[in-house]
Image (cartoon, helix red, strand yellow):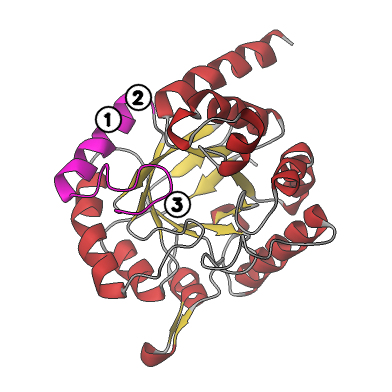
């Protein structure tokens, strides 16, 4: 997997890419409210880039377990002012959304990547717009397809059962192939196993241990372990005290083939990945 094609950039995947999280929300599970204002979110974008972020991922609606849906209008009010600033900062910008109209508005405003926890399964019937169609008709944008069991309101009430790795792999393969059938180059597609989205602690760690089984799908692979509750379950650490555990998980994800890691703590993750790179170079 040499690169990930996005709107403005062919992202080189020869080295792991660090995607810095910018939550423009009051209710995200980890840092909700810390960067809720437009000005605070803009400054956080700049801080993450100074810390070494290769990509910024902007989200204006929380998808944590139990999160309440946000209206399209409110999401755009939060997102667009920060996005317009972020695209001037010299790195690719991803927008974390599942709503087709928000995707379109974000791409029109210069976003490079759509990061969708619903893997493009949403449609806007009122406007005759589907998420997949928005991506398919764009000539170059990148897209990240994530596996989620259930929905944010219910996903941890009734987690997945059965052969977890096979189920996640098959879902992501089907989602990617459906886009390819609509004319989207596979180089534009990234996949994400969706750590914590409708899975038990044991299932999440099974996905990490067997993550390399996703690589033969031929897409860039993103891992999102940052501050997740599974890390708290094995360490006993509170959400805001999982920096070390998150950096270790990111390093293990990269060792197991991840091309991109999505993180809150960019500086610490960059340091951890430099150690991984040094070991790999020595080997």
**Quarter holding residue 246:** top right
Q: Earlier in the sequence, mark 2 or mark 3?
A: 3
Residue tagged by mark 1?
Answer: 47
Helix, strand or loop at mark 2: helix
Q: Which mark is residue 6?
A: 3
Q: Nearer the viewer, mark 3 or mark 1?
A: 1
Residue tagged by mark 2?
Answer: 51
Q: Position of residue 75 (x, y in %)?
A: 29, 66
Residue at the far right: name it.
163
**Quarter holding residue 31:** top left
C-alpha distance separating marks 2 and 3 = 22 Å
Q: Look at the numbered discs 2 and 1 and tell me whether their residues touch, using CB distance below 8 Å.
A: yes
Q: Position of residue 221 (x, y in %)?
A: 62, 45
Helix, strand or loop at mark 1: helix
Q: Residue at x 46, y 59 (%)?
A: 63
C-alpha distance separating marks 2 and 1 = 6 Å
Q: Which mark is residue 237?
A: none
Left or right of 245? Residue 158 is: right
Residue 271 in sight from this viewpoint: yes
Is 54 in the magenta?
Answer: no
Q: Residue at x 34, y 39 (%)?
A: 91
Q: Residue at x 74, y 11 (%)?
A: 283
Q: Position of residue 141 (x, y in %)?
A: 44, 58
> The magenta stretch spans which residues?
26-52
Q: Residue at x 71, y 68 (%)?
A: 174
Q: Position of residue 105 (x, y in %)?
A: 29, 68
Residue at the far left: name it.
39
Residue 224 in sight from this viewpoint: no
Q: Look at the numbered discs 2 and 3 and tell me whether their residues touch, using CB distance below 8 Å.
A: no
Residue closest to the eye, 86 or 227: 227
């Amino acid at each position: 997997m040499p690169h990930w094609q996005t709107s403005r950039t062919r992202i080189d995947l020869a080295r792991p890419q660090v995607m810095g999280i910018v939550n423009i929300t009051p209710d995200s599970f980890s840092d909700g409210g810390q960067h809720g204002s437009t000005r605070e979110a803009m400054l956080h974008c700049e801080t993450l880039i100074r810390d070494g972020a290769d990509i910024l991922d902007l989200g204006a609606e929380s998808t944590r377990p139990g999160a309440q849906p946000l209206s399209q209008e409110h999401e755009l009010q939060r997102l667009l002012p920060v996005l317009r600033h972020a695209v001037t900062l010299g790195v690719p910008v991803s927008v974390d959304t599942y709503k087709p109209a928000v995707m379109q508005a974000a791409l029109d405003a210069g976003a490079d990547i759509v990061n969708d926890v619903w893997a493009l399964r949403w449609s806007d019937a009122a406007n005759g717009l589907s998420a997949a169609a928005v991506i398919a008709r764009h000539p170059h944008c990148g897209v990240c397809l994530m596996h989620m069991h259930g929905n944010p309101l219910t996903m941890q009430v009734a987690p997945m059962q059965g052969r977890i790795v096979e189920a996640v792999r098959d879902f992501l393969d089907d989602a990617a192939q459906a886009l390819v059938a609509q004319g989207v180059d596979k180089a534009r597609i990234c996949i994400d196993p969706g750590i914590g989205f409708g899975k038990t602690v044991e299932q999440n760690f099974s996905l990490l241990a067997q993550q390399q089984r996703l690589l033969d799908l031929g897409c860039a692979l993103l891992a999102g372990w940052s501050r997740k509750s599974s890390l708290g379950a094995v360490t006993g650490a509170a959400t805001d005290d999982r920096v070390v555990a998150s950096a270790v998980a990111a390093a293990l994800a990269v060792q197991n083939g991840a091309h991109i890691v999505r993180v809150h703590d960019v500086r610490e993750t960059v340091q951890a990945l430099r150690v991984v790179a040094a070991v790999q170079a020595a080997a």
